[in-house]
Image (cartoon, rainbow, N blue to C red):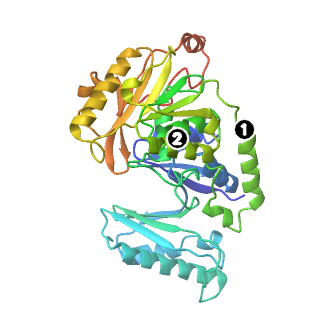
Amino acid sequence: MPRFELIATTTFGLESVVTRELERLGYADTRTLDGKVHFAGDERDIARCNMWLRSADRLLIKVGEFHAPDFGALFDKTVDLPWSDLLPVDATFPVAGRSVQSRLHAVPAVQGCVKKAIVESLKKKYNRFRFDETGAEFAVEVSLLRDVATLTIDTSGDGLHKRGYREFAGPAPLRETMAAGLLQLSYWNRDRQFIDPFCGSGTLPIEAALIGRNIAPGSGRSFIAEDWPWIDRKMWKDVRTEAKDLRQPRMSEPILGFDHDPAAIRLSEKSAAEAGVGGDIQFRIQEISELKSSREYGVVVCNPPYGERMGAPEEVEAVYRELGRVCDSLPTWSFYVITSNTWFEKHFGRRAPRRRKLYNGRLECQFYQYMGPAPPRERSAADSGATGEAAAPNTADEV
């Protein structure tokens, strides 16, 4: 099988999470840049990574990268790339583009130049002057950053946050890929109680259930590369079968999702059923002030109102104060909160031992991490040298 340079794109701040995911899948030789993790793989790896990556946005094939200060260089160097190795004669190949801090800043002109250059390259291979583009789609992107052009082909199609289980989302939704990233930054594992007291449309509880059951996030959707003629359809079938075989049984501790909005709870229940984890999650209408637990150890991961799009400032501040009170009442629990509100710690009542800058959509946020003590069993495992998610968080760096 041919080998490719693959790029898993991700939200800024989650690069280390995606790198760790790739390492768990067996890809040790990775290179991380802002919003991108590079690694090598073949056709099967394209299928596996689309199926299993939880926090990446897309999976791309890197076709080439070069200095392009003008249209002449952009055209000539694009022509020289091995397009015929990837695009069959009937390929449909739309070209999208973006430009940041580059002399070639007119994106439509950049896209047109790359499109013409690809056609010129294919003419040499296929000895024809017209391409009808009636076959499978190969979405090309040209990205210019400081006059360096990177040309890629998307293997995912719809973004990887589109798992296939959620037709509608509530107001201010959290992307599935972001939710999975937050969970992988926490101490939570399937043996510990998980609660989201602001579950909205249920994204965090559903993603937690998918992780706890080891259900591949891409198992309920299709990918654009499945239609490519040079990737064997049987390979995709085998990857899906393998993913199904790796699913784990129902967890001993149910995942809990609470919200004060009955419509949000109904939407959450519907989405969880579509995801195949309806029996793993208990959704309930409940205010944050009612949150309590008889469990000695557990984890809260939540995306409360920020005051940006939802909730008046004084209402949001009251929510944070109440969340801080709940945290005080559960001293052995761990709390993880994402918000763009810069005064969160003041109203919550304590500074976070760790925090990480992330972007929820276009909003700059902080992920505040308050780690409680590990249960005795997990401490014993760590002391004896055993490894696992319970012994350490998935990432420990602070931004």
Q: Amino acid at mark 2?
A: Thr
Looking at this view, is 29 or 283 the one in front?
A: 283
Residue at 51% x, 27% y: name it: 194
Residue at 59% x, 72% y: name it: 83
Residue 228 vs residue 16: left or right? right
Q: Quadrant of the N terminus?
A: bottom right
Looking at the picture, how far across and down is residue 188, in whole percent? 52, 27
Looking at the picture, how far across and down is residue 65, in whole percent? 47, 62
Secondary structure of the residue carrying numbered label 1? loop
For disc 2, the neighbor class at 10 Å (few under 14, some 14 to 19, many from 20) is many
Which residue is labeled 1 in the image?
Answer: 246
Residue at 53% x, 77% y: name it: 118
Instruction: Judge whether 398 appears above or below 310 on screen.
Output: above
Which residue is labeled 2 in the image?
Answer: 19
Q: Quadrant of residue 54?
A: top right
Q: Quadrant of the C terminus?
A: top left
Would you say residue 31 is visible in this rendering?
no
